[in-house]
Amino acid sequence: GEGALVRPEMGGPVPPHPPATVLGCYKVPRTWIPWIRQKWMCRIKIAAWNIQRGRQSHLEMACRALIRMSVDLCFLTKAKLTEGRHTWSSHGYQVVATEAASHRQGGIALVWKESLQWQVESWKCHGPNVLSCLLVSGKRRTPLVGVYIPPEDTTTLVHIENALNRFNEGRYQPPILLGDLNIKDLEAPEGARDAEIAALVASYGLLNMYNHFRQRRYN
């Protein structure tokens, strides 16, 4: 019948009398397949969240909320962290952050869980409002770039371009850009600043995923 192969060292239920053994792997019953998929398939929840500030325990509070939402990796914009004064781990998350321009504006932090299925590598800060890293899962190497563009700011675009150019080789997956661009509509930019941001995004062939999710309406 239909089955799947699983290594014994992965844990979980192992039949006392396995029906067949192939290279140290047990052929498990069909009824175990959903359990194996749930426990061992590599599904990663990635998010971006404007937390307004990460000082005075707000960063720890954000990590606690991410646990409740089962988020694995998140870029926290407007973190406003300076001089490295922040926790480096909280509630099972590793934390790195840029040096914000001031404790009142900008800054971005990256938090992620440690996992056996994937790893975060080569994180790097590009100025106060851009942070890039590499998400590695098996042979897939996906660049992630977290961004916060303050209103009326155009200098951050240079840092975004430098971050995207880090991973322009063919062995990488297409990059994922997350964060707060402070632009109303990438498809219909208003003004020279918005047009410049939209042009940068389009030049790298990035698609806007905003319209692919149902947005909550407020009365």
Image (cartoon, grey):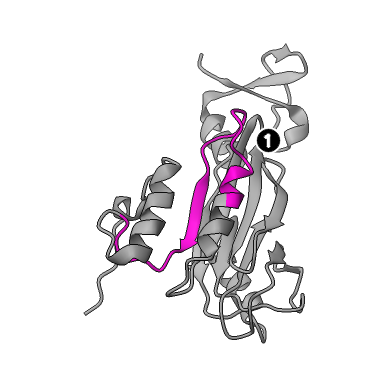
- Verify whether residue 170 appears in magenta: yes
Q: Nearer the viewer, residue 5 or 111?
A: 111
Q: Nearer the viewer, residue 160 or 74?
A: 160
The residue lying at 53 percent from left, 75 percent from top is 51
Q: Where is residue 1 in the image (x, y as percent from the top left)?
A: 51, 13
Quadrant in the picture for residue 152:
bottom left
- Compared to residue 140, the image places residue 158 above or below, namely below
Q: For the C terminus, which image quadrant?
A: bottom left
The residue lying at 77 percent from left, 75 percent from top is 84
**Which residues, given as a range, are shown in magenta?**
162-186
The residue lying at 60 percent from left, 51 percent from top is 163
- Compared to residue 36, the image places residue 24 above or below, namely above
Q: Nearer the viewer, residue 8 or 83?
A: 83
Prevailing secondary structure of the magenta residues: loop
Quadrant in the picture for residue 131:
bottom right
Which amino acid type is shown beneath numbered disc 1?
Answer: Pro
Side of 152 relative to 121 (left or right): left
Q: Name the residue under label 1.
A: 13
Q: Where is residue 20 in the image (x, y as percent from the top left)?
A: 69, 13
